[in-house]
Image: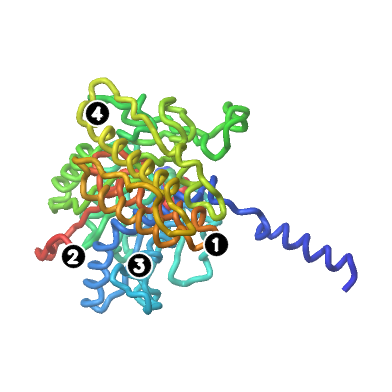
Amino acid sequence: MNANRQMAAYTEAARSGQYAKASGLSGKYDNVRRLWEDEVTRNNLRPFLQRLVHRLAQDMRRIRILDLGCGSADGYELLTGVRDRDADLKQMEVAVLPPAAMGLYKGVDLNEDLLQQAAALYGHSPKLLFEQGDFTQGLPVGGDEEPYDLYFMSYGSSSHLNEDETMVRLLAEIADRTPAYSLVHCDWLGRYSYEWQSLWATDVAENRNMDYVVSYIYDGAEREARRDTLQHLTLRLVSRQEAEAMAAEASARAGVLIRPLAFYDRSVLTGRHMDTGDYNAGPQPIRRAVNALHEVNLRTDLSALLFDYVPAKGFPLLNGYYEHLQQCWNFLVGFTAELLDRYDERSRTFSGPIPDPPAACPEPLRHMLERVQRVVEGTGWYGMGLPRENIIEPQLGFALRHLVGALQQGLGCGHGFVGIFEIDKTGTAGAEP
Ligand SMILES: C[S@@+](CC[C@H](N)C(=O)[O-])C[C@H]1O[C@@H](n2cnc3c(N)ncnc32)[C@H](O)[C@@H]1O
């Protein structure tokens, strides 16, 4: 093979994009997106999706999904990646939604470029369909279209419905068009995320929509250099109270109950705007530090994870919640740092006493302290594969994720605020899974 041909092979490889240096430290699919946000979304949806798939199997039907604001079809990957929690280590088929259970996934979006990306990725499959449509104008489905089983919105899509009226109308239409049973997954921006503490309002009639600047895709200096050309979106901020009110209004209008099954806060301290400081100069870039915890071969300065919550005047309940979270989060980080400090790899023992948990330690924190200690003891001596960087730090990341998930209250305190609803016209509304 001559030199020119060899170089052509490298040129092609470079142009394909496959040779680009991928990092989980930044970008849309950073480590927090993949390992926290996607997984938290899946974990919360799992019991309801499992029950829906089971229900359809009993009726000898496959699932039909409508993804509203599908973008480049990330929702498809998200849903097909939900795993059976009870699968053991031997099992290879772990998907709650295996290919054989999938009937149709239809993605609707206003943006043509994103639809083209989606079609390029998945258009070859006859089970996936993409269409342009505007969900602020009503449910984007044809009159003769068969109904769907799961109406899915993810990663803030629901916040594009800036007016309550359009959200209420959409929910009421879904309820109307549900013959027997359907699930609705709404995903908004949380009204009380610490990232935009400057926008919190005691009267929910204020600051309903935020001017959301897409500044996080650039780092520090580049962000400032591009400040004037950054894209802005108008996005609805939603609290639990508002979500419940919209569902109740839509229920009344449709004459059928749109029953909330779960509300939860996602990315409470790790939203993308924690790193930009655009709406709250207080917190340091915690998302960046969490991304580092999960980054292969990278050692993280754990002190970058510690934070000092700055209370907001007039929000005693929220301040109490965030202060408690700060105490728990910082304790777990400090505890891990101390263990690392005291662990002796040769003797496989700690050189000093293990720090005691605080007397008022909540259960989730106590569990995570125990697990982190076991990870350090179990792998600190391992030597191969960089135990701190590649085993202990990612496990601290998962412990923090668990802690935040266990303490969240579904009030609208995360970057994302998710509501899962069911419409059941069969009169057999199941118990909580
Ligand atoms: C935050 S993105 C979420 C994309 C995708 N669901 C995901 O999980 O990554 C919101 C999406 O909603 C789409 N969108 C915004 N307004 C819309 C509208 N009125 N009708 C349909 N799609 C819309 C945008 O084009 C964008 O793809």
Mark 2 element type: loop
Tell which circle, 2 or 1, labels the residue nearer the N-terminal end: 2
Which mark is in front, 3 or 2? 3
| C-alpha distance separating marks 1 and 4 | 51 Å
The residue identified by callout 1 is: 385
Tell which circle, 3 or 2, labels the residue nearer the N-terminal end: 3
The residue identified by callout 2 is: 180
Type of residue at label 4? Val
Relative to the observer, which residue lies in front, 372 or 81?
Answer: 372
| C-alpha distance separating marks 2 and 1 | 53 Å
Type of residue at label 2? Ala
The residue identified by callout 4 is: 204
Relative to the observer, which residue lies in front, 115 or 431?
Answer: 431
Mark 3 element type: loop
Residue drawn 31% across and 46% down? 404
| C-alpha distance separating marks 4 and 2 | 34 Å
Tag count: 4
List x then y, in percent, for residue 397. 41, 50
Residue drawn 33% across and 46% down? 266
Q: Is residue 154 above or below residue 275?
A: below
Mark 1 element type: loop
Mark 4 element type: loop
Circles 4 and 2, Cβ within 8 Å, touching? The answer is no
